[in-house]
Amino acid sequence: MDRLATGRRICAPDMSGLQRFAFAVLAAILPLLAAAQSAEPYPSRPVKLLVPYAPGGATDIIARQLAAKLEQALGQPFVVDNRAGASGNIALEAEAKAAPDGYTLLVGNVSTNAINESTFAGVLQTQPSRDLVGISKLVEIPHVLVAATSFPPNTVAEVIEWAKKNPGKLNYASAGIGTYPHLDMLRFAKAAGIDVIHIPYKGGAGQMLPALMSGEVQLSFINLASTIEQVKAGRIKAIATTMPTRLPELPSVPTMAEQGFPGIGTNAWQALFAPAATPKPILDKLHAAVVAALSKPEMKEALSKQMMTVSLSGSPQAFTEEVRAETRTWAQVVSEHKVKIE
């Protein structure tokens, strides 16, 4: 055997010992590599924005405008992905199942994130108030109580008087069972002590407006962004708006509150959401970027022309609690009126 000057033998290497040493080194390095990867500035790759409806609607419009601004601010593409269907539940459930890493977000609204949890309780595979967190409210879209021009009443009081004189004859349009136009009319009817007949339209405003203009239905709570031009043209008439104060676009139309029904009527907010386990630093970064983008005067002006009022939240935590509280409120409405979708 070879010997050193000291007379010691040079032993053959212990291969099992080297393997143990290598594994120990890897075990120490891998967490460091993972930490380094997770420490990459967010976002470091494209971000997907799920939209629960087809292109062209209010949710899609604000999503696309927001995506462009976030891309400019954060340096990565924000790609709109329309997942229409099942009253928004397809996108809602996809968001709940997405990795909580900030790379799949949802532009949702009052229907998907506050009402569907109750109306679809028997079929929805997720619980939005538990499985999602809010980043910020984005905009509010005022609603208006409108009537067919052939319908005699011009005020809320006259609507009530007509309904009581003509029991079982007042019908109204909605975007479907369990939607807020449906629930709002149920709330109004109960508060006013009148009977109403529900005519649901699966096609939303695209079907509701022709029905109103033709006199097929008499009344409806509907998105003002979809109806403002028809009201101005005299094809339908506005009875009341649902905002706290009168709208500059319709200064002669009183609010529901002015006509004795405060709190009746929903202003359809749109908002940005993420999976519940998304890290707080990512939520905070997105919130700051959203606030900076939508606070710009030119952005507010562009959205106001589409009847969208910028309405931002103070923090992701505050908005999450606001949505959860609203979810509980809608649950009471749904339960009170026994609205259920199988």
Image (cartoon, rainbow, N blue to C red):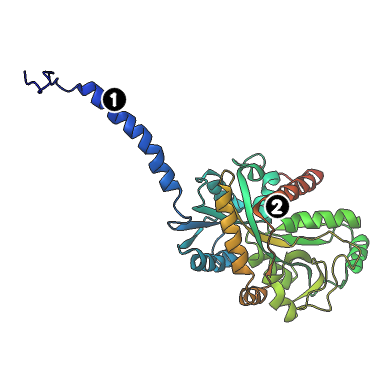
Dot label at residue 318: 2
Dot 2 falls on a residue whose secondary structure is: helix
Residue visible at 91% across and 63% down in the picture = 260
Inter-mark Cα distance, 2 to 1: 51 Å
Q: Position of residue 39 (x, y in %)?
A: 45, 49
Drawn side of residue 205 relative to residue 250, left or right: left
The local crowd at label 1, few if under 14, some if 14 to 19, many if 20 or more residues have their Cα within 10 Å, is: few
Q: Mark 1 points at which residue?
A: 20
Q: In what quadrant of the picture does the N terminus appear?
A: top left
Q: Which of 21 and 204 is in front in this view?
A: 21
Residue visible at 31% across and 29% down in the picture = 23
User: In this rendering, is residue 151 above or below 34?
Assistant: below
Q: What residue type is labelled 1?
A: Arg
- Looking at the image, is mark 2 or mark 1 nearer the viewer? 1
Q: Nearer the viewer, residue 265 or 138?
A: 138
Q: What residue type is labelled 2?
A: Ala
Drawn side of residue 260 relative to residue 146, left or right: right
